[in-house]
Image (cartoon, coloured by chain):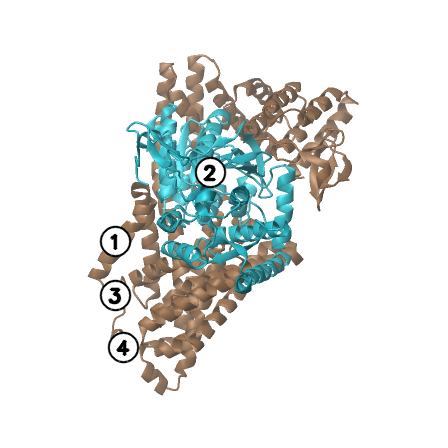
Chain colours: A brown, B cyan
């Protein structure tokens, strides 16, 4: 049971103690009636329970909404339940005391559909307005506000009289105004309510006001339209900010997918068609790590991604190392053969994964810190996208440091810029080649960990990113990390600004056409490498 | 890890079974061959591999019952690798080299279109198990999946009646099935009095993974004070990121329900379903159907595949129905001769898994119940609505002006898949 439910479960007991033993037979009967009849009879049954106005019914109603209300098949008695292994623990729907544990087959769930869920949320809202818990009252008021429930007016008035908490009070007044809009109150009252809803309600107020805009009452309709215009004006600016954010978020995904390729293709010049499969290996490593954690250490689930990161780097890196030593080193200077050979490797890797894990998608869970969204003014930042943007930038910075600040990075740049000279200075160029390729692949593996959070983890994962990756690297300028960053972000933002006008399909085509034209003009991309390296 | 091991084991099993059937071809002369034309590699392997497995299971079960016409059935499995032209080549191989008596296969409409000329030329039989856009009726093809009137229209009716939806988002992947289905739905909604501005149509490329803008658009479209729903014909892999984005942007089913035509138990298996509870799907079968036939089917499936966690879905049931219809027609005809079976199978009725009987109609489509299910936390569907009787598949939609006057009847004397009732001629439109 969720903590809120538990609170509800305690509440009636307290009330019982206060009011002495009260006859709750009738409520019990009403709840038990839920076990009978068809889905379409349920609305009436819920209403009958709501009419009692008895707060003791709230835990049962919440359980019904959340799909946790079952009935015992033997005697059609209704219970709240909690899953325990393969069976269910049954709780009395009114007192909340534990009754017994039954096997799955002995109980049956009481079904609800969306319409009933909405009804239940509204009913629970108006029944919990006077709950002793401020958060519950706040949630109740917000529900009423969103639905504009006329029947809650009386309850709201009563609750407002005794409400002390300023935040809850404000929410209740807003809820009252939204309920008023749908009632048959006087015009001046409605106009006042429209203004309150418009100024305080934010985006949620728009649907309520839109309904009023077609009202027969002239002054109410005008007031509503005025408020809508105000809200939309404020919203317009936020909307373009939101589009930029979507663009950055798409750009960071492109960056993640491309950054490994910026090393293998950009720095080394290997046309690596198996790059996408390195990303896929990283994603599957995440899946395996999560499976192990789920099976053995469920408490560590929130850290699963952190644990997967080094492993994914090692798995994909080792695979890249083997590829370089086994195939690619024989093909340096023969781009067409390299392309075909790596394409072959990508097919082999895909089918191998399909053979081991099966062709279906694997479920990679989101840790709790990657679910949900943050509201920032008028912006909605979803947590997983936010983290991926941060993560992409961290990976970029780390790679940049490795290339510019470490001995290995120096050797790598030396080898790629002038192989003969580097070799004669005593650098073991074949090893540097292998390690560079392993580094690029390992980074692709790390990207896979992040992409597993937003994409399907299936054997085809890599294919969907390979084209985009090449696009970014070529556009940004081969051999230049900054180019990859700017290229990815530019393409992401451009794509998102085009999408609303051109649709997703056309936007993608337009971007491709743009890149083709751009490459005609600047064949070396945004940031071309200058100097002797270019001729090499 | 257990699930993983099981998967490895089940794969091993499948290979052995496939290997056995392949090797048995060498010595078993007197068998009836059944072709299985499903992609085992490439993008569509995710959906089609399961159908290959279910066919192997059905054939094994039939052989346990003594085979067909006193002979054992033998599966011939080929892999068209999600490559549409390869489908035609592999179909030719099945019919010419292996001389199979019937083929069960295909998933995407484009792959079906690519094999049609082959089945026509070589006179084979194809059972096609997936819901599709309709507008087709071929002499050599039997459509055991749903036509639009067996899935899309009842789903929209459910939303109209139960959710009182007034604004509609028709979102789909950009190819023939969503485009045709949405055309039909648009015409249907307009006939029901929905105005142009209350319909938003959106197409995305295959495998679209960045849904932020579109979900935000849907959210904005839905905040106009009228109840809004999304009718999704989004295909395959693109569904998972779409639902994830819905969940992340806080759109719950009680605000804007999504009814999907391509999301079944199998697709949900790769997904954390908690934020999706209440979103809908329309199918002719759900694993949660409570009948003894279904219970037996699920048990046999789990035992065959060796994995307790594997699910069953609608196209699997379509193969179950199609295979049993073919078996019954062959028994009735006493031969596997293609022309005789094509004539005999019309009117054959076999039990489906939802407790009724499905019959093959003269237009080569079948009768099925339509079920509406809501997604549950365990990745299964709660059936919230069901058509009163069976719905007969309609090859030519009544809501498209060009198709409304066409009928299909493969019985003699009409013997035509697209008879124009106005001009009284056969061949009113396309094939």
Residue beneath label 4, please? A536
Residue at left 29%, top 52%? A511
Horizontal placement of A156 versus A491: left or right? right
Residue beneath label 1, please? A513
Q: CA distance from mark 3 to mark 1?
A: 17 Å
Q: Chain of mark 4?
A: A
Q: CA distance from mark 4 to mark 3?
A: 14 Å
User: Mark 2 or mark 4: which is in front?
Assistant: 2
Residue beneath label 3, please? A524
Residue B44: image location, x then y, percent = 45, 53
Ranked by sequence position, the earlier of labels 4 and 3 is: 3
Q: Looking at this rendering, what residue extends furthest in the right direction?
A: A21
Q: CA distance from mark 4 to mark 1?
A: 30 Å
Q: Quadrant of residue A169?
A: top right
Question: What crowding class fits label 1: few (fewer than 14 Cα within 10 Å), some (14-19), or many (20 or more)?
Answer: few
Residue B304: image location, x then y, percent = 62, 53
Instruction: Specify whether disc 3 shares its chain with disc 2.
Output: no
Is residue B130 visible in this depiction of the protein?
A: no
Q: Looking at this rendering, what residue extends furthest in the left direction?
A: A521
Q: Nearer the viewer, residue A108 or A43?
A: A108
- Where's the N terminus of chain B, which quadrant? bottom right
Residue beneath label 2, please? B146
Q: Chain of mark 1?
A: A
């Amino acid at each position: 049971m969720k903590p809120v439910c538990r609170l509800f479960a305690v509440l009636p007991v307290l009330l019982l103690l206060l009011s002495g033993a009260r006859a709750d037979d009738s409520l019990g009967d009403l709840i038990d009636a839920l076990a009978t009849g068809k889905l379409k009879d349920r609305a009436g049954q819920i209403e009958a329970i709501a009419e009692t106005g008895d707060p003791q019914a709230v835990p049962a109603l919440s359980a019904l909404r959340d799909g946790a209300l079952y009935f015992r098949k033997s005697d059609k008695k209704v219970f709240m339940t909690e899953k325990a292994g393969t069976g269910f623990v049954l709780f009395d729907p009114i007192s909340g005391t534990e009754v017994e544990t039954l096997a799955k087959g002995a109980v049956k769930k009481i079904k609800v559909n969306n319409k009933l869920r909405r009804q239940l949320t509204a009913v629970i809202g108006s029944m919990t307005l006077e709950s002793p818990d401020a958060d519950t009252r706040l949630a109740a008021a917000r529900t009423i506000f969103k639905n504009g429930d006329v029947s809650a007016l009386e309850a709201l008035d009563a609750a407002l009289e005794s409400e002390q908490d300023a935040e809850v009070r404000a929410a209740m007044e807003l809820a009252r105004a939204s309920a008023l809009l749908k009632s048959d109150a006087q015009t001046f009252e409605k106009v006042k309510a429209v203004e309150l809803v418009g100024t305080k309600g934010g985006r949620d107020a728009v649907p309520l006001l839109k309904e009023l805009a077609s009202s027969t009452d002239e002054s109410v309709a005008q007031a509503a339209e005025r408020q809508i215009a105000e809200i939309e004006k404020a919203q317009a600016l936020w909307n373009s900010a939101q589009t930029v954010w979507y663009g950055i978020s798409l750009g960071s995904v492109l960056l993640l997918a491309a950054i490994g390729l910026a090393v293998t293709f950009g720095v080394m010049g290997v046309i690596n068609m198996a790059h996408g499969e390195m990303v896929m290996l990283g994603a599957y490593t995440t899946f395996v790590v999560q499976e192990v954690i789920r099976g053995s250490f469920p408490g560590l689930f929130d850290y699963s991604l952190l644990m997967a990161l080094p492993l994914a780097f090692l798995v994909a890196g080792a695979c890249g190392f083997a590829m370089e030593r086994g195939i690619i080193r024989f093909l340096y200077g023969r781009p067409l053969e390299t392309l075909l050979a790596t394409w072959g490797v990508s097919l082999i890797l895909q089918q191998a994964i399909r053979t081991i894990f099966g062709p279906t998608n694997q479920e990679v869970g989101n840790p709790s810190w990657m679910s949900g969204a943050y509201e920032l003014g008028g912006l909605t930042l979803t947590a997983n996208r936010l983290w991926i943007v941060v993560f992409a930038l961290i990976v970029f910075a780390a790679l940049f440091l490795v290339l510019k600040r470490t001995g290995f990075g120096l050797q790598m740049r030396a080898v790629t810029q002038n192989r003969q000279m580097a070799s004669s200075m005593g650098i073991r160029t074949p090893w540097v080649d292998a390690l560079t390729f392993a580094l690029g692949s390992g980074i692709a593996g790390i990207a896979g960990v992040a992409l597993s959070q937003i994409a399907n983890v299936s054997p085809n994962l890599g294919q969907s990113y390979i084209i985009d990756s090449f696009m970014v690297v070529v556009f940004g300028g081969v051999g230049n990390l900054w180019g990859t960053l700017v290229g990815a972000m530019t393409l992401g933002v451009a794509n998102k600004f085009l999408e609303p006008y051109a649709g997703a399909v056309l936007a993608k085509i337009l971007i491709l056409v743009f890149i083709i034209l751009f490459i005609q003009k600047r064949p070396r991309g945004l940031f071309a490498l200058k100097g002797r390296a270019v001729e090499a | 890890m257990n699930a993983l091991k099981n998967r490895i084991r089940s794969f091993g099993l499948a290979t052995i079974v496939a290997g056995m059937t392949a090797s048995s071809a060498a010595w078993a002369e007197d068998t009836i061959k059944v072709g299985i034309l499903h992609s085992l590699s490439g993008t569509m392997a995710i959906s089609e591999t399961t159908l290959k497995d279910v066919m192997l299971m059905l054939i094994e079960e039939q052989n346990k019952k003594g085979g067909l016409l006193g002979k054992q059935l033998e599966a011939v499995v080929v892999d068209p690798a999600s490559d549409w032209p390869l489908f035609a080549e592999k179909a030719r191989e099945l019919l010419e080299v292996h001389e199979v008596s019937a083929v069960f296969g295909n998933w995407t409409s484009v792959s079906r279109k690519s094999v049609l000329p082959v089945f026509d030329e070589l006179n084979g039989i194809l059972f096609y198990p997936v819901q599709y856009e309709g507008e087709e009726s071929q002499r050599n093809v039997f459509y055991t999946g749903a036509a639009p009137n067996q899935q899309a229209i009842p789903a929209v009716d459910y939303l109209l009646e139960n959710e009182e939806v007034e604004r509609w988002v028709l979102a789909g992947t950009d190819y023939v099935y969503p485009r045709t289905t949405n055309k039909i739905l648009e015409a249907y909604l307009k006939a029901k009095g929905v105005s142009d501005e209350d319909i938003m149509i959106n197409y995305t490329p295959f495998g679209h993974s960045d849904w932020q803008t579109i979900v935000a658009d849907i959210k904005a479209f839905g905040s106009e004070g009228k109840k809004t729903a999304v009718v999704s014909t989004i295909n395959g892999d693109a569904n998972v990121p779409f639902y994830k984005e819905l969940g992340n942007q806080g759109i719950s089913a009680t605000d804007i329900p999504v009814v999907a035509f391509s999301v079944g138990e199998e697709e949900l298996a790769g997904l954390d379903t908690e934020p999706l509870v209440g979103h809908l799907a329309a199918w002719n079968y759900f694993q949660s159907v409570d009948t003894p036939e279904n219970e037996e089917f699920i048990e046999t499936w789990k035992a065959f595949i060796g994995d307790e966690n594997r699910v069953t879905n609608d196209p699997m049931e379509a193969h179950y129905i199609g295979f049993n219809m073919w078996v019954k027609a062959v028994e009735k005809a006493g031969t596997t001769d293609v022309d005789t079976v094509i004539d005999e199978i019309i009117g054959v009725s076999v039990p489906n898994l939802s407790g009724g009987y499905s019959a093959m109609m003269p237009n080569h489509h079948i009768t099925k119940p339509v079920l509406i299910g809501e997604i549950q936390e365990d990745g299964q569907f709660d059936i919230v609505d069901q058509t009163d009787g069976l719905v007969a598949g309609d090859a030519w939609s009544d809501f498209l002006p060009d198709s409304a006057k066409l009928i299909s009847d493969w019985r003699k004397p009409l013997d035509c898949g697209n008879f124009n009732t106005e001009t009284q001629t056969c061949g009113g439109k396309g094939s």
